[in-house]
Structures are given as structure tokens and as C-alpha cells.
């Protein structure tokens, strides 16, 4: 009997211990999700400590269990020479950093970045720097500032603070084109309020580089990650420096033909590697089976990376392998990179036939639309002919033909309702191909959406500024006002907007980085959104450079 009791007690204890050992991995039962960020509850040594041992062990403890997957690059040891003398070990709720054989009078910075997460994926909100010295003094230089925002390809991009990194490189060692071969002397993350701060760094001249570390490898990928930089920060002659940064895209790669595919009989689609500056005569010649053929090129102005080629000499319905050579003229991407001479020619072989699908149509608008809006239809044919588009009133069955106000683009037809005197009410939109109805949709046409206005001034600008007003619900509905030097006024649809301005020094209509000169065009962002209301003006929306 006693033996059975002992067995039962052992089983119960095993279950309890097992539960305790794994409890931190469980989600709480019921209630609101845990959104509390981890915080530091203890650290040693104390920040700013002097005369520390050359083989010191530093520790940091947290309030939450840490997601081990987020610990990669979550801690940076600076300066770079000290990294080789440190070993980082992570535990469930703490981290230990062991140092060995540090130099005399060595200032050490342990930077905990905001990429660190707990098991519920909550990131730590603020950067933390634990600093100490092995001597009787500690380095005193400081460098700080804000990340104001990012403008990428004419859009204001939302950026996650926990993926931002700020690196300081010694100026006499820095080259932007060999940046991944150079180790930063100091590195920190960015706090939730979009601020960064270096403390206790040594006196020197530095090149600061801010970048959006998408793949969390702490290395700048110049062609794919947003960045910002300036030529130098003088911390030899100054104890403190404060600089704000706006991020942009650095594109130094020339455009090229990515792919050419048949989409209909007599029509090819040419996909470029990126958007280009559209112009006439993008294509120089097309050769099919050793013969130059006549062709026409066309494109959708809203899609600058696709060119369509039509030729009566092409017959893609024949089941015969065709060699087609496309030769381009000079083309330039939005960042003014000119196509490489060797990349102007593309040879393709087409063996498959192109079977024309049944015509299909879909709508890009809701059931309720405003009478001063544009409505759009998407087709699976590039330019369907013999279409009739009608608006039929549900009240009296009156028919309004819309063909005469239809703007055709590749695969798209767009109709501007303001060009017809259409009353409010319920309607059916019907599309016929020949005599066959292929689309029908009931819509309620409401009173005009109207416009509001935003007004203000640009101050202290050396050249004309480009202003971006971007709809918070749909960034594609952004409006840009170019070359503003003083007072301005712009008409916008009602809604909430974020806005920014930048000085377009190289006139390419983009916020640009010059890597060779180590600078970026100046940009300012408004922190608050703007509410635009119909027939109202939002005044004093100013941009001060």
C-alpha cells in the first residue's frame, strides 16, 4: 500500500514539475492577448561604471521570456575592436556577455536593439545602452537625432522602428561602394519614438549611415534596403552632434529587359526590370527569323515597367518556333540610370501557340459611387473592340451610352462620369460584346464627392520643393505638387492624408541619395495627419526646411 502511495505521489510531482518547466511557453487561457513589451529589470555593471575588470561579465535580465529567434543581432558590442573579445549567451529571461582581456582605459558599449522580442512577439520599445570603462575615465562624445520618415518612389512609406539600424563608420576607412566590407565602429537601433542615441563614444570623425534592415542581418543591402547618410560628423571638435535623417532608395542598377511573353496573337508584352521614363521609340528594331518587321509600341502611362508590342508580321497562333530579337534605344530608369549597351538586345524563342481566351471583365469599383468619380473595368484582353458600355436607370430604364467618354489603356477601360450629366439614383452598368451581355452590375450613384483644399507655405527652401499628400486609406491616391517655393494651395478629395516635402535638387521627381558625395536631398515630414473635408480649406500646413 505504501509502495502504491509513493508511486502516485511521484506521478503527481512529475506532472507538476513538467507543467512548471514548460509553462512559460503557453499562451494565457482567455482574456486579451499579451501586448506588454519586455523591459529590463536588472543589469550589471551599473551604467557609467569605472575601473571594471578586464575579464568582466555583464548581465541583463528581462521581465518576459525572450523569443530566441529575435536574439540574432539584438545586441551590438562597440567599439568594433571589443567585439572579438566578447561572448554573448542568451537564456530564457536574461543575457550574459563575457569579456576577456580588454585594453586599459577601454570604454565599452553594450547596445540592446529594439529588434528583441518576447515569446508573444512584443518588441522592446526603447534602445538600451550599458556602458562602462576599464580605466578611471569614460569616453564622453554623444551623437543623437530622429528618423523623420521615408519617401520611396514618390510615396511616403511606413517603416517599422525595430528594423532600423544606425551605424557609425570611421571617416578615414569609409567607402559607400564597399560598405559590406567595412565594419562599423558603433551601432545602435531606433526606439519606438523614432529616436536614436549614441553615448560615450570616442573622439573621431564619423560617417553615419541609417538603414532599414529588412532581413535582420545588420548589413546594408544598398539596392534593396532604404537608407540615409551624410558625409561626416565631427566628434573630435564637438562633444555632441544632433542630426535627423529621412530615408530614401538608392538605385544604381541600370534597367534591362526582364522577360518577353506573347499575350495575344500579334502582341508581345515586354517586362522591364523596373519602371522607366516613358518616351516615344523605346524600341529600335524587331527581327523575326532574320527579317526586320514593322511594329507599333504602346504602354499604360500608369505602369512604367511594361511595354506592349503589336505587329501584323507576328503570328503567334502558328505552332512554329520563332526567334525574335528585340533591340532597344537608350532608356533610363526613374533614378537616371541608363541601360547598359550590352543589355539593349534580347533574343527570345517562342514555341507555344497563343490561344485567345474568352473575353472576361471585372469591375474595380464599389456598389456605391460618386457622380464625380472615375470608374474602371479590367479585361483579360489587351484592347477589346466592339464593346458597348451603357448606364441604365432603374427609375425609368433610360439608357446613357458611355462609350464616348471611355479612356482605353492596356487591359483597362476608365470612365469619367463628370463628362455626363448623370442624376443621383440607382442604375445598372451593362457591357456588351457585340450583341452579347458580358457584364452587369447594380450601382448607386450618389452626390458629388467633391474636393477640399490644403494651403500653406514652404519656408527656407533653397530651391522649389515637391509636396506629397498621400491618402491614408490608399497610398496610390497620392497627389504631388512640384516646385513650390513659397505659398501653395492644392485641391484634394475628402479624407485623411499624411504629407511630406523634399528638395528635388537633381530634378528627377524623387527623393534621391548621392552615394559618391555621401548626401541625401533634404526632406521634412508632418507628424500629424490632415483631415480634408468637402468645400473646406485646411490652412497653415507649412513645411520649414
Image: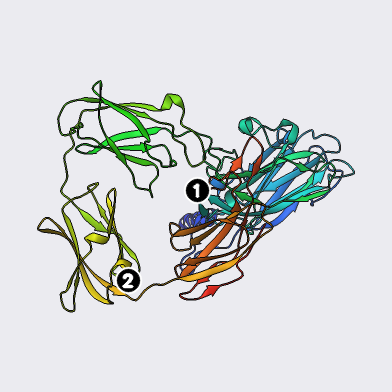
Kindly report the distance in space between the C-alpha atoms of the residues bearing marks 2 and 1.
31 Å
What's the residue at 53%, 35% (across, down)? 252
Q: How is the image coloured?
A: rainbow
Asked if 534 appears above or below 18 in the picture, the reply is below
Q: Give me the disc on residue 371.
A: 2
Q: Position of residue 218 (x, y in %)?
A: 60, 40
Left or right position of 126 against 222: right
Foreground of the two, 41 or 412 = 412
Is residue 195 among what the camera can see? yes
Q: Give me the disc on residue 517.
A: none
Considering the numbered disc 1 on the image, is that residue within a helix, a strand or a loop? Answer: loop
Foreground of the two, 455 or 527 = 455
Q: Residue furthest left?
A: 435
What's the residue at 32%, 75% (across, down)? 446
Asked if 315 appears above or below 454 in the picture, the reply is above
Pointer 2 with pointer 1, Cβ within 8 A: no
Is residue 13 among what the camera can see? no
Considering the numbered disc 2 on the image, is that residue within a helix, a strand or a loop? Answer: loop
Of mark 2 and mark 1, the one earlier in the sequence is: 1
Q: Position of residue 164 (x, y in %)?
A: 60, 48
Q: Residues within 10 Å of mark 2 (few under 14, many from 20)?
A: many
Q: Residues within 10 Å of mark 1 (few under 14, many from 20)?
A: some
Q: Position of residue 110 (x, y in %)?
A: 72, 45
Q: Give me the disc on residue 153.
A: 1
Left or right position of 72 against 421: right
Amino acid at each position: 500500500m505504501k509502495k502504491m502511495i509513493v508511486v502516485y505521489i511521484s506521478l503527481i510531482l512529475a506532472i507538476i514539475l513538467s507543467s512548471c518547466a514548460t509553462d512559460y511557453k503557453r499562451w494565457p487561457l482567455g482574456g486579451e492577448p499579451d501586448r506588454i513589451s519586455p523591459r529590463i529589470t536588472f543589469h550589471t555593471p551599473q551604467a557609467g561604471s569605472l575601473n571594471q575588470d578586464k575579464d568582466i561579465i555583464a548581465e541583463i535580465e528581462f521581465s518576459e521570456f525572450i523569443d530566441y529567434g529575435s536574439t540574432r543581432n539584438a545586441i551590438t558590442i562597440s567599439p568594433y575592436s571589443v567585439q572579438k573579445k566578447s561572448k554573448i549567451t542568451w537564456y530564457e529571461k536574461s543575457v550574459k556577455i563575457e569579456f576577456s582581456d580588454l585594453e586599459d582605459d577601454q570604454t565599452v558599449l553594450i547596445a540592446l536593439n529594439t529588434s528583441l522580442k518576447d515569446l508573444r512577439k512584443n518588441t522592446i520599445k526603447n534602445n538600451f545602452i550599458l556602458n562602462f570603462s576599464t580605466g578611471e575615465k569614460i569616453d564622453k562624445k554623444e551623437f543623437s537625432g530622429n528618423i523623420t520618415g521615408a519617401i520611396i518612389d514618390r510615396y511616403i512609406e511606413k517603416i517599422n522602428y525595430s528594423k532600423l539600424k544606425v551605424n557609425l563608420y570611421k571617416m578615414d576607412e569609409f567607402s559607400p561602394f564597399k560598405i559590406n566590407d567595412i565594419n562599423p565602429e558603433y551601432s545602435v537601433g531606433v526606439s519606438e519614438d523614432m529616436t536614436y542615441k549614441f553615448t560615450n563614444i570616442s573622439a573621431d570623425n564619423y560617417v553615419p549611415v541609417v538603414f532599414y534592415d529588412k532581413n535582420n542581418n545588420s548589413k546594408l543591402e544598398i539596392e534593396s534596403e532604404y537608407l540615409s547618410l551624410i558625409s561626416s560628423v565631427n566628434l573630435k571638435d564637438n562633444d555632441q552632434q544632433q542630426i535627423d535623417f529621412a530615408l530614401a532608395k538608392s538605385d544604381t542598377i541600370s534597367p534591362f529587359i526582364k522577360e518577353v511573353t506573347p499575350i495575344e496573337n500579334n502582341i508581345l508584352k515586354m517586362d522591364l526590370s523596373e519602371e522607366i521614363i516613358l518616351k516615344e521609340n523605346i524600341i529600335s528594331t524587331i527581327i523575326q527569323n532574320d527579317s526586320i518587321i514593322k511594329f507599333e509600341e504602346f504602354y499604360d502611362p500608369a505602369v512604367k515597367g511594361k511595354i506592349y508590342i503589336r505587329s501584323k508580321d507576328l503570328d503567334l497562333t502558328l505552332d512554329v518556333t520563332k526567334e525574335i530579337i528585340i533591340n532597344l534605344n537608350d532608356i533610363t530608369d526613374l533614378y537616371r540610370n541608363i541601360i547598359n549597351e550590352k543589355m539593349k538586345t534580347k533574343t527570345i524563342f517562342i514555341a507555344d501557340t497563343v490561344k485567345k481566351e474568352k473575353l472576361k471583365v471585372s469591375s474595380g469599383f464599389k456598389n456605391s459611387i460618386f457622380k464625380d468619380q472615375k470608374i474602371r473595368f479590367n479585361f483579360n484582353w489587351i484592347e477589346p473592340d466592339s464593346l458597348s458600355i451603357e448606364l441604365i436607370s432603374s427609375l425609368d430604364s433610360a439608357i446613357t451610352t458611355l462609350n464616348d467618354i471611355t479612356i482605353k489603356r492596356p487591359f483597362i477601360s476608365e470612365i469619367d462620369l463628370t463628362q455626363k450629366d448623370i442624376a443621383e439614383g440607382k442604375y445598372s452598368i451593362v457591357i456588351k460584346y457585340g450583341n452579347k451581355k458580358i457584364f452587369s452590375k447594380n450601382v448607386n450613384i450618389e452626390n458629388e464627392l467633391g474636393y477640399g483644399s490644403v494651403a500653406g507655405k514652404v519656408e527656407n527652401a533653397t530651391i522649389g520643393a515637391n509636396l506629397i499628400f498621400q491618402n491614408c486609406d490608399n497610398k496610390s491616391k497620392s497627389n504631388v505638387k512640384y516646385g513650390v517655393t513659397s505659398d501653395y494651395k492644392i485641391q484634394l478629395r475628402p479624407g485623411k492624408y499624411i504629407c511630406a516635402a523634399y528638395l528635388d535638387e537633381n530634378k528627377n521627381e524623387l527623393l534621391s541619395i548621392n552615394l559618391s558625395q555621401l548626401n541625401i536631398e533634404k526632406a521634412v515630414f508632418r507628424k500629424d495627419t490632415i483631415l480634408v473635408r468637402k468645400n473646406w480649406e485646411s490652412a497653415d500646413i507649412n513645411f520649414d526646411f
